[in-house]
Image (cartoon, rainbow, N blue to C red):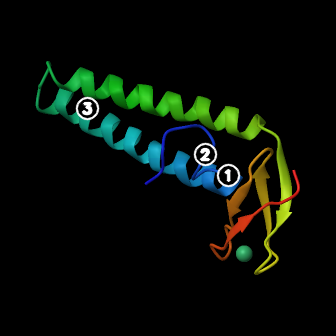
Amino acid sequence: MARLSLFRPNVSTIKDAERVALRWFSIGFVMLGSGFVLTFVLAGRSVGPAVLATGAVIGLGTVIWVALATRYNTVRKTCPRCSASNAVFRGENYFRCAACGFFAVLREM
Ligand SMILES: [Zn+2]
């Protein structure tokens, strides 16, 4: 599965970043929701706030991560197999095509 390191090895394109961010957003959202239920509905006052806080931190962290990722320089690379255009983070040696899943190795740097 995806590693937490910023851009590699599974996050080499903007599409990868969106996919990872969406996953973390859903985790944060679920934690916020269950933390809210624990705190205010089930009155689990010891566990609820901790789950709420963790969910909030994950949500905030994802927002910051996305802001960093979108500011990072990207270059347009054409997939050698389906010729779809991919926004690849600068400095990546390879990327996985968002359209067809082809694993493309970039020779020029
Ligand atoms: Zn492709």
Mark seen at residue 8? 2
Q: Is mark 2 within 8 Å of ligand 1?
A: no
Q: Element at badge 2?
A: loop
The residue where tag 3 is placed is 35
Q: Are marks 2 and 3 in contact (CB under 8 Å)?
A: no
Picture quarter with the N terminus: bottom left
Q: Are marks 2 and 1 in contact (CB under 8 Å)?
A: yes
> In this picture, is 15 found above or below 84?
above
Left of 54 or right of it: where is 75? right
Label 1: few (<14), some (14–19) or many (≥20) C-alpha neighbours in 10 Å: many
* Quadrant hosting ligand 1: bottom right
- What's the amino acid at mark 2? Arg
Which residue shows up at 53% across the image and 35% down it?
Answer: 62
Left of 106 or right of it: where is 48? left
Q: Quadrant of residue 58?
A: top left
Label 3: few (<14), some (14–19) or many (≥20) C-alpha neighbours in 10 Å: many
Q: Quadrant of residue 32?
A: top left
Q: Which is nearer the eye, 93 or 11?
A: 93
Q: Earlier in the sequence, mark 2 or mark 3?
A: 2
Mark seen at residue 12? 1
Mark seen at residue 50? none
Which residue shows up at 34% across the image and 27% down it?
Answer: 54
Label 2: few (<14), some (14–19) or many (≥20) C-alpha neighbours in 10 Å: some
**Residue 77 point in image, percent of width and height:** 84, 62
- What's the amino acid at mark 3? Gly
Which residue shows up at 72% across the image and 67% down it?
Answer: 104
Q: Is mark 1 within 8 Å of ligand 1?
A: no
> In this picture, is 80 found above or below 42?
below
Q: Earlier in the sequence, mark 1 or mark 3?
A: 1
Q: Which is nearer the eye, 70 or 29?
A: 70
Which residue shows up at 31% across the image and 37% down it?
Answer: 31
Q: Element at badge 3?
A: helix
